[in-house]
Amino acid sequence: MNAPVGPAGGSPLSNYRAGLRLLSLAIPLGAAAGAAAAVTYLAMIALQGLIWTDLSDVRWIILPLTILGGALIGWTRLKVKAPEIEAQIASARAPGRTQLRQAFWIGLGAVFAVGFGGAIGPEAGIIAVTAQMSAVVALKLGRTADERRMLAEAGVSGALSGVYGSPAGGTMHSEAEGRAPKPVLFAAGLAGFAAFALLAEALRPGALALMHLPRLTTEASTTDALIALIPSAAGAMAGALFLVLKARASDLLGRHLPAPFWQPVAGGAALGVICLLSPLLLFSGHSELVEMLRIGQEEGPLPLVLLSAGKALACAICIAAGWAGGVVFPMCFAGGALGAATLFLLPGVDPVLGVAAGMSAAAAVGMTRPLVAGLIMLFILGGGLAIPVFAGTLIGWAVLRQLPPGLSGCEARHDG
């Protein structure tokens, strides 16, 4: 039987030594995972920049490009089927099952998905590469099954912390059932966050600005917590709409297009049609937030409602069709748009309040991980928006509890 790692077993001295050893391995592993995440991310945006140019005069090119992207993703799916991000994280916790070949094809498919305009975030492709890399290292260095699992989680924590720009969010997302020491995972996450930021900026100055949400600031009072409940509820509805549409699209594709190659192609065709109507719905949405808010200011709430529904639909189709990616940034766009739209009913209220609350609620529901989503949003939006972020996370958690457990395609996570 494997000896436990940490304070639960052995003498205080042996526990101290085991903890110190774990920490000494977890920090460089987290940094390495963050660096690998940065390289994968840079490959994604390099492909994106190579493919896409100004679409104002050549909007027709969107459809053929998304279909081509779907065909390339379908080719990778003939090699291996890409699991969703939660399944990838779970597989990394059992290093004996790791398959580097699988990680390569999943990662390549995810690079195509982001590069060809998928309405998804880069998380899944990055985790496909870094989680398996961490699992391999953990298998070599870990002395016990517990230590190997914790080291694998440390690597995932480092990668996710860099991707989300939030050491706390990456730590919470990588942790399994509260068994890993949080200080170790947080240290690995902090190392991964630092390595990701430093390497990305060193290799491509300005790369982080392409990924992170625009910095929003406002003065939020206690009274604003009550006001924030309105855009929070709207944002939560955007997240719920995404889950419903994803389930419906998955069922439809599974019944009519069982072949793994044609599902991404169909998804690319559907994405192209949607984005022909509004090219703003291409990509993950974080770089398009400012333009979305400008449209709302100039044209009123109706375009914001349509953009929110369109982003939820585009993201749902991409995920259901096997375009491997994450949902945090698309949900920020969808929830932020709907949250801002509701504040047209409340003249004089700072629109940033609605955007932050709507983003947080949509991310909480769309990720099905409210606490993780809240930590991510709090870190990337800033402490000045803690009140609307908390309101959005709380409402998202409440709405998620009312949804059917299997709606997201996996057992719903109602973490508080």
Image: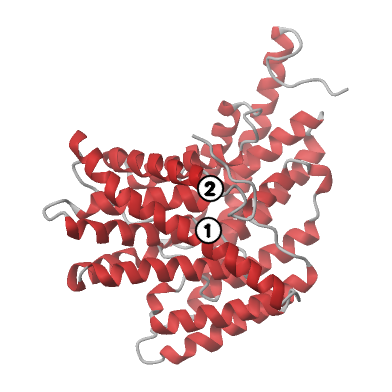
- Judge whether 340 appears above or below 165 on screen: below
Name the amino acid, label 1: Leu
* Residue 329 visible in the picture: no
Q: Which residue is mark 2?
A: 368
Q: Which mark is residue 416?
A: none
Judging by the rendered image, the residue that carries numbered circle 1 is 243
Q: Nearer the viewer, residue 5 or 374?
A: 374
Instruction: Classify mark 1: helix, strand or loop.
Output: helix
- Mark 2 burial class by Cα count in 10 Å: few <14, some 14-19, many 20+: many
Q: Residue at x 48, y 42 (%)?
A: 370
Left or right relative to 200: residue 291: left
Picture coordinates of residue 176, whole percent (x, y): 65, 35
Badge 1 local density, few (<14 within 10 Å), some, or many (20+)? many
Left or right of residue 37, residue 358 in this image: left
Discs 2/1, front: 1
Task: Look at the picture and state if 300 lies above or below 159.
Answer: below
Give the residue drawn at x 49%, y 45%: 402
- Report which quarter residue 16 is drawn in: top right
SS at badge 2? loop
| Residue depicted at x 38% and y 47% | 380
2 and 1 marks in contact (CB < 8 Å): yes
Q: Quadrant of the N terminus?
A: top right
Residue type highlighted by circle 2:
Thr
Pick whichever of labels 2 and 1 is earlier in the sequence: 1
